[in-house]
Image: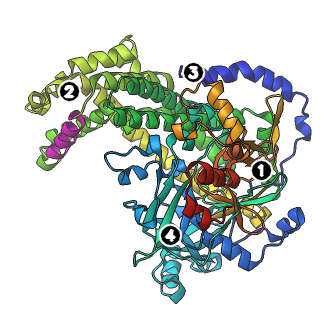
Amino acid sequence: MHKYYYMWLWLVLLPGFIQAQESVDLDKVEPGRFDQGKMWTFENPPVEYFQEAYNFTPTDEWMEDVRKSALRFATWCSASFISEEGLIMTNHHCSRSVVGSVMNEDENFDENGFYAETRADERRVPDLFVDQLVVLADITDEVKALTGISEDSALAVVEAKYAAKEEWSGLKIENRTFYSGGKYSLYGFKTYEDVRLVLYPELALGFYGGDPDNFTYPRYNLDFTFFRAYDESGEPLTPSNYFTFNPAGAEEDEVVFVIGNPGSTGRYLTMSQLEYQRDTSVPAILSYLQDKMEILMVEADRRTDIYKKDSITNQAFSLSNSNKAYTGRLEGYYDPVLMTKKAKKEEQVRTNVKVEGDDPWTEIEANVAEMSKIYGDLIFLSPGQLGGKVMQILHKLYSYRLALEQEEEEAIEAQKTDIETLLSDFDPQLERALFGSQLAEIKEHSKGGFIDGLLAGADPYDKAKELIDESMLINDAEKFFKQKAGKLDKEPLMAYANEFVPRYQRNGAKYGQLSAQNQEFQKKISNLTFQLSGVTSPPDATFSLRLADGIVKGYEYNGTEAPYKTTYFGLYDRHFSNNKEFPWNLPEKWKNPPLELLKAPLNFVSTADIIGGNSGSPIINQNAEVVGLVFDGNIESLPGYFIYDPAINRTVSVHAGGIAAAVKYIYKAERLLKELNIE
């Protein structure tokens, strides 16, 4: 798909979208009660709101139980205990990167899945761990009482104090800052490092619909994996706290709660920051992602090694996932209703607070104006791996030249070794495409026109090919490294290194300085906002454990209505409607399903508030029973990075009934049926 497709599509749709919005009187649009979302901390749960909204008042015991039943899955997802025998549930896509380490040479988990018939067959995954939040404390007053020292120092003092307490002994202790210093918390985690694979569905089911269905609903995806935690003696863990698995699953209009670790949101950003993302940073990121995604897909097509091909394809899918996420966010920035809500909320805050000293909103606005001038350099002159090896070599080459001029032997050898490592598996065809895209992106997004002199009118992709083909460094490194410093300018890449690297370093330092200033101004704004709303609005996500409430509910979309749930009937319809082709193909064991499976619910939606990091979160009912497993949001939820809109923002989950049906009718995992009380 062409790199400008999504922007072109939006420009085509935008006039109609604006026309549709004309029926909304923006003067009457007001900020919503939950624009900042519903990702509540366990330190400050909105108990009164729960009673008001749902006639449900969770007790302290309920809150502690669901907190300890939830888990942080490694450093990237969420999970939960779902049996008294340490069974863990998370997403298939959360476990995909680690289960290969326990796969034997004659096995293919992607094609055939994995099920441990007995406990002895459960396989320990190297380096995999889960964290259980067993104790927490609101330390705001203690931190603020320590005047005259930095925030980091104050947090360290308080953390050391708690580490000496008996109930915190031996725990992994982490601090969290909320509302940019309005609140501080301390968390104590019990870590379980013996985690074993129990059941892993085939990739065709765990990633059903692939990239085309990503962020969509109705959806048909069996995105789950079962692990088991073992204790220090090698016996299955018997946790005191776990969610009871309810195979009946969620019902329409039922109150549900997501317990998980949302990664990052920007719901307290200023209007100037949102407009900067809309006009500068997100379009640049999209250009970068779309170029690299296209290149990787072409690269995957020419690979014959199935594992390398799969690795490159997965990387491309990951970029596609980010591409869709940023595209959805960009569309949100163009939504006049959402942006009007944000603008009026900012106006309310600025009107009702007393600002001492420099106005932080004005200062941020001035800073982002400067940042917009250098952002292109920051992203496209970066030596990041996705940019390809040539850009990395340019940075190493620049450092090599400086070391050579200063006769620093240790630095010379270090840079030489790094360059040789980069060249050891250098693929000219791939690197021409990657470096060509970098040059094209620099030309489009960097300011000042400095690239024009280097290109001298040539097409960026043609120039990339010319540079790689004529480079002595790339084609004869041994000869290159015999040259003295004064001879390096004969290397075609040297002129690019001399221009790109100092510019990147200079503007990177400036961007970092402006960002640091903005963090201080943002802290001031967040504190002022906190003075008005307190904990009635939750803080931004920080990959810390949160409780998000919602209702199981469908929504209007595409001129019709999305039902609250889908069934396996829909999965098979997608299979046959798409001619049984990838990514809607099904493994052999799924080809003749019983009617009981077909009728079973598979996915469902709720109004719960999630973001990346929530993948693998249990979705529970008021009885603390698991009724589903969070794995995605719908396409309409993508502006949720900066504002929560309950009208069409939906969390997409695997229905507990869908998991139960697969375990019973396809995997025939009798011991799991018994463990989970599935009849």
Q: Is residue 73 above or below residue 305?
A: below
Badge 2 element: helix
Q: Which residue is mark 4?
A: 152
Is 259 positioned to the left or the right of 115 in the image?
right
Q: Is residue 508 above or below residue 283?
A: below
* For marks 1 and 4 on the same chain, the one whose residue lies earlier in the sequence: 4
Q: Which residue is mark 2?
A: 474
* For marks 3 and 4 on the same chain, the one whose residue lies earlier in the sequence: 3
Q: Which residue is mark 3?
A: 4
Is 498 positioned to the left or the right of 179 in the image?
left
Estimate the x, y position of residue 517 in percent, counting from the top left.
55, 52
Near mark 4 (Cα within 10 A), the count class, few <14, some 14-19 or many ≥20, is few
In this view of the protein, which residue sits in the foreground, 296 or 484? 296
Q: Amino acid at mark 4?
A: Asp
- Cα gap from disc 3 to disc 2, whole angstroms: 32 Å
Estimate the x, y position of residue 479 in percent, counting from the top left.
9, 28
- Cα gap from disc 3 to disc 1, whole angstroms: 32 Å
Q: Amino acid at mark 1?
A: Thr
Estimate the x, y position of residue 166 in percent, counting from the top left.
51, 89
| Residue 271 seen in the figure | no
Near mark 3 (Cα within 10 A), the count class, few <14, some 14-19 or many ≥20, is some
Q: Is residue 637 magenta?
A: no
- Cα gap from disc 2 to disc 1, whole angstroms: 54 Å
Secondary structure mostly seen in magenta is helix
In this view of the protein, which residue sits in the foreground, 454 or 560? 560
Q: Nearer the viewer, mark 2 or mark 1?
A: 1
Q: Which residue is mark 1?
A: 607
Q: Nearer the viewer, mark 1 or mark 4?
A: 1
* For marks 4 and 2 on the same chain, the one whose residue lies earlier in the sequence: 4
Q: Nearer the viewer, mark 4 or mark 2?
A: 2
Q: Nearer the viewer, mark 3 or mark 1?
A: 1
Q: What residue is at 38 percent from the left and 34 percent from the top?
A: 503
